[in-house]
Image: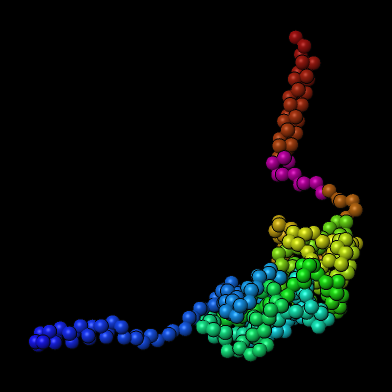
């Protein structure tokens, strides 16, 4: 075998070695940035699928509960399970979720919360959720439904994950009404619905009825608190029976015989001109003397002008002269009639 053949075989062996040699691949974990509630639900259902569990079904009551909790945490600046003026169980029931389990013990529900400096990068279950209690929220076989909420305050993100089991019938338990009406009616929780769905109070109509139109996400519980009444009274006024479920657009009679607010004071549109008296100040003191008016005024004749007296004298002299001439003529005629 000559040198050329040896060299060819060497190059061929080298090429085959590089072709079939095992390659080193650095495995990069999958990282999903969680910025929407739906993304959080998807990754949790992915954890369940990896363990052979069915996916949890999204429910509007759980979505509202989780989102209101995320908004509340963002408002106060830290992660918490506390809810203003209520409990997690009461909130789910008030939102109309048919919660299963012993309601006096809270029912079959659980919640995970966390805060993150920036959007959560999911490359597996977050460390703070890896203990048994938090994993149970995501993996409990009895749970049937899920909801998620995300809120942001500055650069911090707040996450809430709610999971629960619904009753087999899909209907509320009879104990739900008792649990809801056990909320103190004189409560100092007038702002309890602030982080759920705000309730705008309506004024009385001319007949004294107060009618509230249910907005999206509002609950009978929140409406009762804001109008300072009881859930049982709302149920009786609206023939709801024991139901605590209300629908968007539904008109609820809240009160009868209420007083209408006083009409607003109208401000005239025309301008009012104010005249300010002008005071003239003088340094001289004027003594006021009374003016006497005589009862019968005396009329003083105007003096004759000098020319009037002169004319009269001339006329008198003329008359005397005429008389003398007339007398002389008469004497002359008598003495010599011929």
> 166 or 95: which is nearer to us?
166
Q: Residue at x 54, y 77 (%)?
A: 34
Q: Is residue 257 left or right of residue 202?
A: right
Q: Is residue 63 magenta?
A: no
Which percent across, then down, holds residue 26? Answer: 40, 86
Give the residue displayed 88% in from the left and 56% down from the top: 207
Residue drawn at point x = 81 percent, y = 69 percent:
172
**In which image quadrant can residue 208 be found?**
bottom right
> Does residue 23 appear to the left or right of 256 in the view shown?
left
Please say whether residue 187 is visible from this viewpoint.
no
Q: Is residue 308 magenta?
A: yes
Q: Nearer the viewer, residue 257 or 278?
A: 257
Q: Residue at x 55, y 76 (%)?
A: 35
The relative height of residue 3 versus residue 47 in the rendered view (above or below) is below
Give the x, y percent position of residue 115. Answer: 60, 85
Please give the range of residues in magenta.
Answer: 300-309
Pick whichever, 4 or 241, lies toward us. Answer: 4
């Amino acid at each position: 075998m000559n040198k050329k053949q040896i060299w060819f075989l060497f190059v061929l062996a080298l090429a085959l070695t590089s072709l079939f040699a095992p390659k080193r691949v650095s495995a990069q974990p999958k990282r999903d940035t969680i910025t929407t509630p739906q993304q959080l639900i998807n990754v949790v259902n992915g954890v369940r699928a990896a363990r052979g569990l069915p996916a949890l079904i999204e429910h509007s009551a759980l979505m509202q509960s989780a989102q209101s909790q995320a908004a509340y945490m963002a408002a106060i600046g830290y992660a918490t399970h506390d809810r203003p003026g209520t409990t997690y169980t009461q909130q789910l029931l008030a939102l109309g979720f048919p919660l299963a389990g012993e309601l006096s013990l809270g029912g079959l529900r659980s919640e995970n919360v966390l805060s993150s400096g920036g959007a959560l990068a999911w490359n597996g279950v977050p460390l703070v959720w890896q203990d048994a209690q938090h994993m149970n929220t995501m993996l409990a076989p009895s749970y049937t439904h899920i909801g998620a909420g995300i809120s942001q305050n500055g650069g911090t993100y707040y996450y809430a994950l709610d999971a629960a089991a619904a009753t087999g019938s899909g209907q509320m338990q009879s104990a739900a009404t008792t649990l809801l009406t056990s909320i103190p009616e004189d409560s100092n929780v007038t702002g309890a619905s602030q982080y759920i769905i705000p309730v705008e109070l309506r004024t009385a109509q001319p007949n004294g009825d107060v009618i509230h139109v249910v907005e999206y996400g509002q609950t009978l519980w929140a409406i009762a608190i804001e109008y300072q009444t009881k859930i049982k009274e709302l149920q009786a006024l609206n023939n709801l029976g024991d139901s605590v479920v209300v629908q968007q657009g539904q008109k609820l009679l809240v009160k009868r015989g209420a007083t209408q607010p006083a009409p607003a004071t109208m401000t005239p549109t025309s301008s009012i001109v104010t005249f300010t008296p002008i005071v003239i100040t003088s340094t001289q003191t004027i003594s006021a003397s009374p003016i006497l008016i005589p009862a019968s005024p005396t009329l003083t004749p105007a003096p004759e002008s000098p020319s009037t007296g002169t004319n009269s004298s001339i006329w008198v002299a003329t008359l005397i002269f005429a008389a003398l001439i007339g007398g002389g003529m008469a004497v002359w005629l008598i003495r010599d009639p011929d």
